[in-house]
Image (spheres, coloured by chain):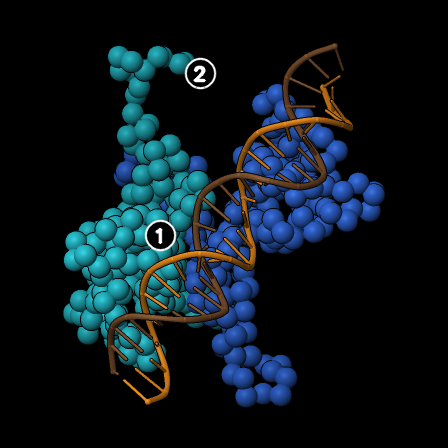
Chain colours: A blue, B cyan, C brown, D orange
DNA sequence: CTAAGTGCAAATGTTTTGCAGAATC
DNA sequence: GATTCTGCAAAACATTTGCACTTAG
């Protein structure tokens, strides 16, 4: 059950909604899960616009598919400090949160079960039925904090 | 220092940047802090467009001021599940996080120091210099969870 | 064969920007 | 008096949608 590939999982989702797994949607899923990296709609549009099979996928279709992939639980959004949002894999990848560098924009992932436990407790107290959470920590990353007074800063002592 | 009113705090911020506290900006700050409620740019535009003093503030000025207010640390953004974002007070109001109901859109605020402590620890481990964080918990609120055994709830047993 | 999906281009909704006149320091 | 702001309208973006054609099931 947890062993389905993203595309299988997506087909299953579409089936339950009476929708179809088309060639375009397959191309998109394949491209999205080809590497674990954050991306936005524009990135993806560029990647599938010049697909090697000669088949191209249009802008509108990418937007429509992204929405489906979110609904299917395959993707989720993460906010960036500049206000823009990017997508990341939400399937076949452990729950995690992010440290977001305001200087270089780096998204650093981390996991922590204690936080989930506390969140669960809070939800209980509020009679809130949790489906998920998102924690974003803003600040400056170790690299950007490093003293700039080096030639090629090899040792960033933090 | 923590005793400045929002508008004083804003003026201070503007001074350090060699910018001015104009009448329009005053109107905006006043309106924004008149009540502690979440709002978006459009809401605020409507509210200051028909200001009682007879003075109106334009759309462009509101957008420009919102950005300044964020930079000044007076406002911060919170995401809603539908993808839209709203602003809330980030000054003169305790640090808190949100439970966000996917059904009715309610934003329920809560505070928890344990989470901050854990976040601080994680930042330490990553050499990350934190400036703040945002935790959003998604799910269904108590109200929407409540038994639908009312008269006109067409009993859709699922 | 039929319902659903696609691409296109036009429409939308939101935020930003150039500029001339107005206001502030 | 010089610099910063404002309002306007146009521009810039990002995303959505109507429609005729194509395709999956």
Which sits earlier in the primary sequence, circle 1 or circle 2? Answer: 1
Same subunit, labels 1 and 2: the answer reads yes
- The quadrant in which the C terminus of chain B is found is top left
Point out the residue furthest to the right here.
A53
- The quadrant in which the N terminus of chain B is found is bottom left
> Which SS class for mark 2?
loop
Report the chain holding disc 1: B
Rendering quarter of residue A129: top left
For residue A27, above or below residue B128: above
Q: Is residue B78 visible?
A: yes
Residues under numbered marks 1 and 2 in contact, where contact means CB atoms less than 8 Å apart: no
Query: Left or right of B140: which side holds A19?
Result: right
Query: Left or right of C17: which side holds A128?
Result: left
Residue at the spot 65% in from the left edge and 53% down from the top edge: A43
> Which SS class for mark 1?
helix
Q: Give x and y (percent) for residue B13.
A: 29, 74
Residue B90: image tag = none
- Mark 1 crowdedness (10 Å alpha carbons): few <14, some 14-19, many ≥20: some
Q: Is residue A74 visible?
A: no
For residue B30, above or below residue A1: below
Give the labeled residue for mark 1. Answer: B41
For residue D6, above or below residue A68: below
Q: Give x and y (percent) for residue B26.
A: 22, 65
> Is label 1 or label 2 in front?
1
Residue at the spot 61% in from the left edge and 48% down from the top edge: A41
Residue at the spot 76% in from the left edge and 42% down from the top edge: A56
* Real-space Cα separation, disc 1 to disc 2, in angstroms: 39 Å
Q: Which residue is nearer to you in this view: A111 or B80?
A: B80
Give the labeled residue for mark 2. Answer: B158
Query: Left or right of D21: which side holds B89?
Result: left
Report the chain holding disc 2: B
């Amino acid at each position: 059950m947890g062993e389905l590939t993203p595309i299988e999982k997506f087909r299953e989702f579409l089936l339950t909604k009476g929708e179809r797994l088309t060639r375009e949607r397959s191309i998109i899923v394949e491209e999205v899960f080809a590497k674990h990296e954050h991306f936005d709609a524009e990135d993806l549009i560029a990647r599938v616009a010049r697909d090697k099979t000669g088949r191209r996928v249009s802008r509108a279709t990418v937007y429509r598919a992204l929405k489906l992939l979110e609904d299917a639980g395959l993707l989720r959004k993460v906010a960036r400090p500049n206000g823009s949002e990017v997508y990341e894999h939400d399937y076949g990848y452990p729950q995690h949160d992010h440290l977001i560098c305001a200087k270089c924009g780096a998204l650093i992932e981390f996991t922590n079960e204690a936080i989930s436990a506390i969140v669960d407790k809070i939800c209980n107290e509020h009679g809130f039925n949790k489906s998920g959470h998102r924690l974003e920590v803003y600040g400056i990353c170790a690299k950007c904090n490093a003293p700039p007074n080096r030639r090629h800063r090899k040792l960033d002592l933090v």
